[in-house]
Image (tube, rainbow, N blue to C red):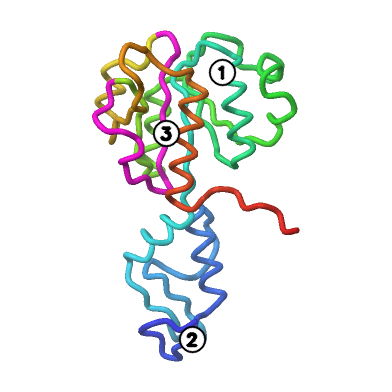
Amino acid sequence: MMVAGSPTGRFDARCFCTVLNRAQGGRSGACGGNLAHAVGGRHLIPAPASLWAKLAAILARMRLALYEPDIPQNTGTILRMAACLGVPVDVIGPTGFDMTDRALKRAALDYLDHVEIARHASFAAFEAVRRARGSRLVLLTTQGEMAYTAFAFQRGDTLLLGRESAGVPPLVHRAADARLRILMRSGLRSLNVAVAAAMVLGEALRQVGATPRSPAT
């Protein structure tokens, strides 16, 4: 691979590994702030700082977030789906049930061991983590201005689902970067939250090319 601005015109694999490490939160490496790796006093890749943002976008992962969920069966079903699709899940408390593995296993079965779950004591705690991650908050709501099929998803988006009994409060609506809805026949109230999650997540992963690949046959 050729790199513009490199004295040798060649890609330095050691530098790239260091950049990957740092983009994922590591501290090791000698690349420095301009993504340059010094070898023998020469910088092989004096890349622009904007490459950091591009690299972060490549490494970003789409996430699901559940706001104060009420029903353990729905949460278990969503966690099982997330395990199968390789999507991390944020659970924002307080929840309406015991969030222990034992309480969730009836719906999620043995899939709980295969899903990454982050638990947050409050929406404020969740927001601090999300903002630090640089993830857009995409709220799924019957009050949404845009159909989810018309929205351009990004790899690092966090898809937020509201509480089964009450949705989300105005504070959460205001914090959302986008509010999406699923078009339905008039006169009907809403879909089950796990069904809604599956529909929108499936479309989002398809758009960004992040659906799991079938094993080689």
Q: Which mark is residue 10?
A: 2
Q: Amino acid at mark 3?
A: Leu
Look at 34% across and 20% down and name the residue there. 185
Q: x and y percent of residue 138 in the render?
A: 35, 34
Q: CA distance from mark 3 to mark 2?
A: 40 Å
Which numbered disc, 3 or 2, marks the residue that appears first in the sequence?
Answer: 2
Residue 150 part of the magenta segment: yes
Q: Which mark is residue 42?
A: none
Q: x and y percent of residue 140 in the render?
A: 37, 27
Per the rendered image, the range of residues in magenta is: 143-165
Estimate how packed mark 1 is, as few (under 14), some (14 to 19) or many (20 or more) residues with alpha carbons within 10 Å.
some
Q: Which mark is residue 159?
A: 3
Look at 66% across and 52% down and name the residue there. 214
- Which residue is label 1 attached to? 74
Q: Amino acid at mark 1?
A: Asn
Number of numbered discs present?
A: 3
